């Protein structure tokens, strides 16, 4: 991967991480005041799912930045520990606050992109090795 591509991807991941942090620190606390405990649990669980999606994608982009900078070999960057986890929050956003539901949707789309990029890179690497 080109450095500029990885940098843009990482910047997008960090922007999503910051938006998620802002939600967790401001949005969720404002909504939970005086709310139903079950509703608070749904919001807390959804916020945890959001955090998992975003941090998993950020970890992958950091490994790719390290590879692009020559700090990791391609084999190390494609190691199982950097493989994005099969995370999803599908069918979970129906009754959530709009801001949180939007963030989860963006995080899932970004996570799918990262997962697809990882699979493409791993396939290319494996094809080169089998030659």
Image: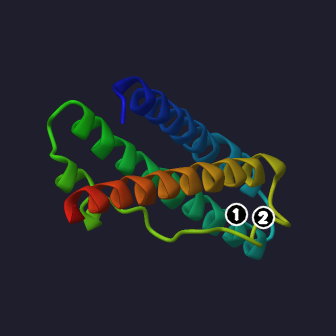
Q: Nearer the viewer, residue 65 or 94?
A: 65
Tell me if 43 is positioned left or right of 84 in this view. right
Q: Earlier in the sequence, mark 1 or mark 2?
A: 1
Give the color scheme: rainbow, by chain, secondary structure or one colour.
rainbow
Which residue is rendered at x = 49% and y = 58% of the image?
A: 115
Q: Is residue 102 visible?
A: yes
Residue 39 picture quarter? bottom right
Q: Is residue 58 left or right of residue 101?
A: left
Residue 101, disc: none
Q: Is residue 111 left or right of residue 98?
A: left
**In this figure, which residue is indicated by the disc labeled 1?**
43
Q: Nearer the viewer, residue 110 or 103?
A: 110
Look at 25% across and 55% down and name the residue there: 128
97 over 35 or under it: above or below: above
Q: Label 1: few (<14), some or many (≥20) within 10 Å?
A: many
Q: Which mark is residue 93?
A: 2
Answer with left or right where residue 17 lies relative to residue 101: left
**What residue is drawn where x is 37% and y is 52%?**
121
Percent coordinates x, y for residue 28 in the rendering: 68, 51
Point out the image quarter for the N terminus.
top left
Residue contact at pointers 1 and 2, CB within 8 angstroms: no
Q: Residue furthest bottom?
A: 38
Give residue 95's position: percent from left, percent from top: 85, 66
Q: Where is residue 100? Give x, y as percent.
A: 73, 51
| Secondary structure beneath label 1 | helix
Which quadrant does the C terminus fall into? bottom left
User: Is residue 51 among what the camera can see?
Assistant: no
**Number of numbered discs present?**
2
How far is the residue under mark 1 from the one under mark 2?
A: 10 Å
């Amino acid at each position: 991967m080109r450095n500029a591509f990885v940098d843009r991807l990482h910047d997008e991941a960090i922007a999503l991480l910051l938006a998620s942090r802002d939600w967790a620190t401001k949005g969720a606390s404002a909504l939970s005041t005086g709310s139903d405990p079950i509703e608070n649990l749904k919001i807390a669980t959804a916020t945890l799912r959001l955090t998992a999606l975003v941090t998993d994608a950020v970890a992958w982009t950091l490994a790719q930045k390290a590879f692009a900078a020559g700090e990791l070999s391609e084999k190390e960057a494609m190691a199982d520990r950097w493989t994005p986890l099969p995370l999803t929050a599908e069918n979970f956003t129906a009754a959530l606050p709009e801001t949180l539901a939007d963030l989860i949707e963006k995080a899932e789309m970004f996570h799918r992109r990262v997962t697809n990029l990882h699979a493409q890179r791993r396939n290319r690497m494996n094809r080169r090795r089998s030659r």
